[in-house]
Image: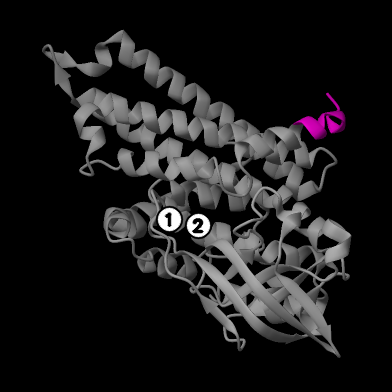
Amino acid sequence: MPALYGPEYQALRESVSALAEKKIAPFAQDVDENSRYPQEAADALQSAGLAAAHVPVEFGGQGADALAAVIIIEEVARVCGASSLIPAVNKLGSVPLMIAGNQEQKKKYLTKLAAGSGFSYCLSESEAGSDAAAMKTKAVKDGDNWVISGSKKWISNAGVSEFYTVLASTDPGKGAKGISAFIVEKSDAGVSFGAHEKKMGFKGSPTREVYFDNVKISDDRRLGEVGSGFSLAMKTLDHTRITIAAQALGIAQGAFDVAKKYAHERQQFSKPIFDFQAVQFMLADMAMQIEAARQLTYAAAVKSERFESDLTFFSAASKCFATDVAMKVTTDAVQILGGYGYVSDYPVERMMRDAKLTQIYEGTNQIQRLVMARNLDTLTN
């Protein structure tokens, strides 16, 4: 693929791609079939400084900008979707800290994140998905402390991560304006985890409910002002939806690579199936859609880094477009491989299952279209 946005990013892509092929791809099928955490990927990414590359250098990270983070996630997702959730979730969990945390909080938690602790994000609940402001989890002031009670649903890497950004209602009567953000540690008394969800895809990334049974934490765990949590959560998603676009982009690229190679190797009617125009047109459409998604995702990443005024539109657009492309491309890849595409001898069936979730989490694509519609006036072109 072409080098975009300078040689330093292409060098990063080549480095991550080589690591992914050597240390992550060989385990991807086993991780999926046995629904196990991709420990090999976690170790490889941590050793290379890629598990939380976005953490600033002053706190032990690589100081990777938004575009670099996108490329890392994209290249890991190309071989294993579940493994790409390691850097993606670490960024999602810690962006609220990077936006609203004070220097002391950043030093304490970002340093540990860079060292390998893991950071998850607790927003959704059983009855509060797209309607996040309807959350029931509460944080009640108790002197200089807060007591958190409730539960969070669909939490990626729950039980593996050491730290959790938790959104909780501190003033239920104020709705969205009565929500605050806190950092909760896995070791805090009263924190526990539900059973592993049995999922269609991303089987290697643990998804569990997180329970808070009167978890008492000090006020220095609060992120930002009381009542600013919902706004912080939405600002966070403006930056992290782009990582889901990157993930979808990588999955689509991986499926396309397999389909293209197979089309040149598979013989029917005494010639490769690539020689048939029907297959050529499918592959051409797949390549076109992937490149369009890449351009939009990279543009959104640059806007994220610059905090541009139309970021909300572009982050939603990149997530929506890239994930729809991933679903289409992976489905077409299965079709090109025919019967082989439907069995686990080839990775495209796994990629198709993984692609489906990208259209759902961090805001369904229906929600993304609402977000875009409400931010049309921010577009300057």
Residue at x 38% of width, y 58% of height: 198
- Helix, strand or loop status at disc 2: helix
Query: Is residue 187 magenta-colored?
Result: no
Whole-percent x, y for residue 63 in the image: 67, 63
Q: Nearer the viewer, residue 148 or 325?
A: 148
Locate the C terminus by quadrant. top right
- Span of residues in magenta: 373-381
In three-dimensional space, the C-alpha distance between marks 1 and 2, rounded to whole angstroms, equals 5 Å
Q: Residue at x 53, y 32 (%)?
A: 324
Residue 221 placement (x, y as % from top left): 76, 80
Label 1 crowd bin: few (<14), some (14–19), many (20+), radius 10 Å: many
Res. 212 visible in picture: yes
Residue 1 visible? The answer is no
Dot label at residue 85 = 2
Q: Quadrant of residue 109?
A: bottom right
The vertical placement of 282 against 193, above or below, is: above
Specify the amino acid type for callout 2.
Leu
**Magenta-span inclusion, residue 380:** yes
- In the picture of the structure, the residue carrying the numbered disc 1 is 82
